[in-house]
Structure formats: structure tokens, C-alpha cells
Image: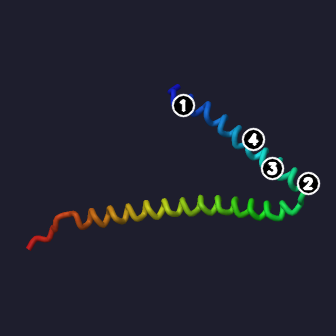
Amino acid sequence: ISSDQSELDLYIPELLATCVFAGIQLLGSIAVISQISWQVLIIFIPVACVGIWLQVTMLYVLGTVCAIQRYLKKEASSFVSFYDKPCQIHV
């Protein structure tokens, strides 16, 4: 086992625990606040939906951008290689 792999094996559970704890804390805070003022849910639910929608949309957009960049690099390289060859016409 390399040292990088063991560091990664130790880092992932810690990161996951931190994210889970932050999520539980956020939901707990919203639950307590909504018990006092239910109008908080009117703001929280649309904001949460927009946040999730933006994350999904950005994953799709980034994937599309990467695919377009790969395509353009392939097209540019074939274009350059086509015109980079010496002329093969013999008179």
C-alpha cells in the first residue's frame, strides 16, 4: 500500500463524516426554526430545490463542455495534420 492510498483511505471517511454532520446540523436548525416560524419553510424549500437543480445542471453543462473541447481538439488536430503534410502533387 502506498502512502498516498492510505492517506486517501483515512481522508474519505473523515470527509464523509464532516458532510453528514453538517447536513444533520442544517436540517436540525431548520426544524427548530420552522417550529417557531413556519414561514422559513416557504423560503427553504424553493432555495433547496434551486440548489439541487443548479448542481445537476452544472454537472451536465461541464460534461457537455468537456465533450465539445475534446471534439474541437480532435477536429483541430486533424485539420492541422491535413494541412501540415507537404503537397504530394507531381507535375
Q: Residue 52's image quarter? A: bottom right
- Rendered residue at 54%/59% (across/down): 63
- Rendered residue at 68%/40% (across/down): 16
Q: Residues within 10 Å of mark 1 (few under 14, many from 20)?
A: few
User: Which circle, 1 or 4, is nearer the viewer?
Assistant: 4
The residue tagged with tag 2: helix, strand or loop?
helix
Question: Mark 3 highlights which residue?
Answer: 27
Which x, y percent locates residue 36?
A: 91, 55
- Rendered residue at 26%/66% (across/down): 82
Quadrant (top left/top right/bottom left/bottom right) for the C terminus: bottom left
Q: Is residue 13 left or right of residue 31?
A: left
Which callout, 1 or 4, points at the residue further toward the start of the chain?
A: 1
- Residue type at the position of mark 2: Gln
Question: Mark 2 highlights which residue?
Answer: 35
Which callout, 1 or 2, points at the residue further toward the start of the chain?
A: 1
Q: Residues within 10 Å of mark 3 (few under 14, many from 20)?
A: few
- How far apart, in angstroms, are the residues tagged by discs 3 and 2? 12 Å
Which x, y percent locates residue 86?
A: 17, 64
The residue tagged with tag 3: helix, strand or loop?
helix
Question: Mark 4 highlights which residue?
Answer: 21
* Label of residue 5 in the image: 1
Q: Residue furthest bottom?
A: 91
- Rendered residue at 89%/60% (across/down): 38
- Residue type at the position of mark 4: Phe
Which callout, 2 or 4, points at the residue further toward the start of the chain?
A: 4
Which callout, 3 or 2, points at the residue further toward the start of the chain?
A: 3
Which callout, 3 or 4, points at the residue further toward the start of the chain?
A: 4
